Image: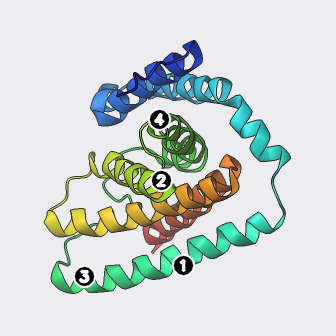
């Protein structure tokens, strides 16, 4: 078996990836101070942007106007399928929380996390960073998309206190979103498109939370 050698650039990405995964697995949640948590998130955000700048620059330069329609269409399909799944699972278990109702963060913190941090960092991590390493072992794009979608879903489900039905429901929802972002990233080689899909999805979810709180 051929030995996998990593370049310095790849070691830096690997190190950042470990920090990100450890943080998402619970380290960041231990920080109760809002200011310190915000600083950490900003450092992580700018670190990933600096390290994977070439992916972002390439995405901006090669972004097509019709990508907006593509992203919106994808999100509409995911929302419709998710709504159908919600109706089905609601009949099975009406206690499954809707959206991010379990979050204890302030509305401002949720806004930053959902519309800025998550679309940028999560896409750079799941599509670019993880893809960079998975490509060394897996040559099939479909398999890579499935693997990154599973990891993407797991990172979201890990912090949610759900029963088996909730895990299945949100696993399917986040799996669909993760696979869609991965599919269009690998199809177009444009990380900005997958960020846009993620952003529109989170915007819809955030709007839903605000509306529920107003009613």
Query: In 3D space, how far apart are the residues under numbered discs 4 and 1 (Cα atoms)?
Result: 32 Å
Identify the residue under disc 1. 77
Q: How is the image coloured?
A: rainbow
The mark nearer the N terminus, 1 or 3, is 1
Q: Nearer the viewer, mark 4 or mark 1?
A: 4
Tell me if I can see residue 189 in this picture. yes
Q: Position of residue 162 (x, y in %)?
A: 19, 59
Residue displayed at 19% across by 72% down = 95
Identify the residue under disc 2. 140
193 to 87, vertically: above or below: above
Give the secondary structure at mark 2.
loop
Query: In 3D space, how far apart are the residues under numbered discs 4 and 2 (Cα atoms)?
Result: 11 Å
Query: In 3D space, how far apart are the residues under numbered discs 2 and 1 (Cα atoms)?
Result: 25 Å
Q: Which of the 4 quarters of the picture holds residue 73? A: bottom right
Identify the residue under disc 4. 136
The answer to whether mark 1 and mark 3 are in CB contact below 8 A is no
Q: Which of the 4 quarters of the picture holds residue 202? A: bottom right
**Side of 131 where 3 appears, left or right:** left
The mark nearer the N terminus, 2 or 3, is 3
69 to 47, vertically: above or below: below
Identify the residue under disc 3. 90
């Amino acid at each position: 078996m051929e030995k996998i050698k990593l370049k310095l650039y790849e070691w830096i990405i690997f190190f950042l990836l470990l920090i990100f995964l450890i943080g998402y697995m619970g380290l960041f949640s231990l920080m109760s101070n809002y200011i310190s948590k915000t600083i950490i998130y900003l450092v992580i955000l700018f670190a990933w942007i600096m390290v994977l700048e070439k992916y972002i620059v390439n995405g901006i330069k090669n972004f097509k106007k019709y990508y907006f329609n593509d992203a919106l269409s994808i999100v509409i399909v995911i929302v419709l399928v998710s709504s159908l799944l919600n109706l089905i699972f609601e009949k099975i278990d009406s206690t499954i929380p809707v959206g991010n109702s379990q979050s204890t963060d302030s509305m401002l913190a949720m806004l930053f996390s959902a519309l800025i941090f998550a679309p940028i960092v999560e896409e750079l991590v799941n599509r670019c960073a993880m893809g960079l390493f998975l490509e060394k072992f897996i040559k099939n794009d479909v398999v890579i998309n499935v693997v990154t979608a599973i990891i993407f879903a797991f990172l979201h489900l890990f912090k949610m206190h759900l029963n088996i039905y909730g895990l299945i429901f949100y696993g399917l929802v986040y799996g669909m979103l993760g696979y869609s972002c991965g599919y269009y990233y690998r199809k177009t080689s444009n990380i900005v498109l997958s960020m846009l899909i993620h952003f529109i999805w989170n915007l819809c979810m955030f709007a839903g939370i605000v509306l529920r709180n107003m009613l």
